[in-house]
Image (cartoon, coloured by chain):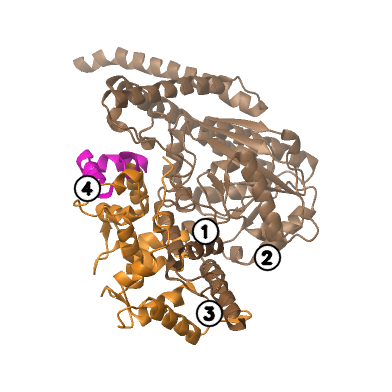
Chain colours: A orange, B brown
Amino acid sequence: MGSRASSLLREEEIEEIKKETGFSHSQITRLYSRFTSLDKGENGTLGREDFQRIPELAINPLGDRIINAFFPEGEDQVNFRGFMRTLAHFRPIEDNEKNKDPTASEPLNSRINKLLFAFQLYDLDRDDKISRDELLQVLRMMVLRMMVGVNISDEQLGSIADRTIQEADQNGDNSISFNEFIKVLEKVDVEQKMSIRFLH
Amino acid sequence: MGPFLDFNPFDNLLCILLGISFTVWFTLLLVFIIVPAIFGVSFGIRRLYMKTLLKIFEWATHRIERGAKDNNHLLYKHYSNAIIAKEPTSLEEEINEIRRRGSNRDLDSASAFEMSDIFYFCRRGVESIMDDEVTKRFSAEELESWNLLTRSNYNFQHISLRLTVLWGLGVVIRYGFLLPLRVTLAFTGVGLLVVLTSIIGFLPNGRMKNFLSEQVHLMCYRICVRALTAIITYHDSENKPKNGGICVANHTSPIDVIILASDGCYAMVGQIHGGLMGVIQKSMVKACPHIWFERSEVKDRHLVAKRLSDHVEDTTKLPILIFPEGTCINNTSVMMFKKGSFEIGSTVYPVAIKYDPRFGDAFWNSSQFGMVNYLLRMMSSWAIVCSVWYLPPMTREEGEDAVQFASRVKAAIARQGGLVDLLWDGGLKRGKVKDAFKEEQQKLYSKMLVGTQEDRSRS
């Protein structure tokens, strides 16, 4: 499938994506090749089923939520620009970017944006708050409740959710806002844990 | 009547010329290809051809690189193994590490759950979106050098005039000369196989019949090998499979069968097809016992196992040839071996087949091309170059079950062929992954939650 791909991605597009996401030229062409190989329908966009075809993603407990992150509100198809924009959150933060012009807009892979990506994985209804229910839903996805010898009941998950909200909530609205989220995770090495390094 | 008289001498001349060229053509065919096939000798013409081609490909790649540099463009370089760095840490290790370093509370009151726990799953998920181990095995491998086939290059805009001319010449040679030659040979080979095995079928069972059947099979497969211009190097032939054993190999294309069967005699296993394949299968089984299943019988695993073990117990019958992956993989990796053939309990002779992708990609992407289309592509490539290694025989050890035995054999084949050893099932080409794998991950995470719950309740 190689020969078809590069003819469809023009130099101007590569430059625009480079500016927007910060990926290098070769990284963009390589990811474009990946995009086209996932695009079985060959219509220039990916749907949810194209992502679900990846076995390693299908067995990821949070797989569905991650796939959701690629699709903006209400849409069912994502094009290459959207694909790259979401992947850009996982670009490692380079040293020379840390001292950039503070008036320039936040790059997609900044610490804040990485945290926002994680926040939105919890916050399904996008109301900028993680409610107890939303937290419980994520817990349920990550856990195997009926296991030989161990039972994790819904009550246990519920109490975990309550405790987590209690510890994080500062303004008493019984949910976690983005700022409270950032505060809880202030010591976590987000830059490293939410970054994917390219080999070339 | 006048104008027609003028045409006659030309017609005659044309006929004579055609007649001469056909005769020459067929004589050459006979001398250089068919007779050596019968006796299993080789003039070495194909190896010379291969060396010449390699030199041309290197030159072509060099020109493309130069062209790209001159225009200040970046060349798309393909890296076959990985494009992103994946840490080999486990779920537990990584989540614990994030918790330890990032927690606001002190370490003694370890909590069951942290909001940062999802980072691990997040990153792994996005890593698999950028590059996963499975989906790329079901499409043709990409090449670094260019082999003058349009199907396999990504850097078209850097081709100069000279390269285009060379490419055009390549097309003319491949489609105008090589393809007709090969198709003729293929028909000859298959035709001879059908006719001769049917004739042998009339002989009474005995040593004479077996001997003749072996010779006929070998000869026809050798003609087919030449029909594909396959240049095969066999290693370690002292380990060749013997009667009463099962020969196991990695699967890349239907051509694998021709490659192995032109060097030794095997009993094939498979489903009966209709059409031309069916005719070939039915005539082959007249000369020596192959194991063909009806479509309905394939599902009955008990029946399949019984027929295979019956065959294996009879030491006058040839070794069985099986491809345990069950489907074609693109020759960069070996996928899960189905345990059926490893439960039978006879000696297993592993064979590793590795194709050289520079001359023509042998992988059959059955969702992309049908069989006929695939064969045409094969016959219009430059050549099929591959290496076959016969590995030492293996038997199931004490306390090893069929699945572990299968994994051991698979690892040996992967190691020898330089292929990646994967646990994933080749059936993922078409089907969905089992939920059991997701449950394993959930189980690991649950243990982490529950483990610390217990600590909590104790303290």
Viewer-nearest of discs 1 and 4: 4
Label 4 and label 2 in one chain = no
Amino acid type, callout 2: Leu
The crowd level at tag 2 (other Cα within 10 Å; few <14, some 14-19, many 20+) is few
Residue nearest the viewer, comparing B458 with B278: B458
Question: Alpha-carbon distance for marks 4 and 2?
Answer: 73 Å
Query: Label 3: how many residues lie within 10 Å, few (<14), some (14-19) or many (20+)?
Result: some
Q: Amino acid at mark 1?
A: Gly
Q: Nearer the viewer, residue B339 or B437?
A: B437
CA gap, disc 3 and disc 2 = 39 Å
Is the C terminus of chain B in the top left, top right, bottom left or bottom right quadrant? bottom right
Residue ID at (51%, 54%): B274
- What is the secondary structure assignment of the residue under circle 4? loop
3 vs 1, front mark: 3
Q: Identify the residue under disc 3.
A: A145
Report the chain holding disc 4.
Answer: A
Residue at mark 3 to residue at mark 1: CA–CA distance: 29 Å
- Residue that sits furthest to the bottom in the current view: A155
**Chain ID for label 1?**
B
What secondary structure characterizes most of the magenta part?
A: helix
Q: Quadrant of residue B128?
A: bottom left
Q: Chain of mark 3?
A: A
What residue is shown with label 1? B427
Q: Is residue B446 above or below residue A50?
A: below
Q: Which mark is residue B303?
A: 2
Q: Looking at the picture, how far across and down is residue B356, in whole percent?
A: 52, 34
Residue under label 4, please give it: A101
Of helix, strand and loop, which one carries label 3?
loop
What is the magenta range? A1-28
Instruction: Say whether mark 2 and mark 1 are on the same chain.
Output: yes
Q: Which mark is residue B267?
A: none
Q: Is residue A13 above or below residue B384?
A: below
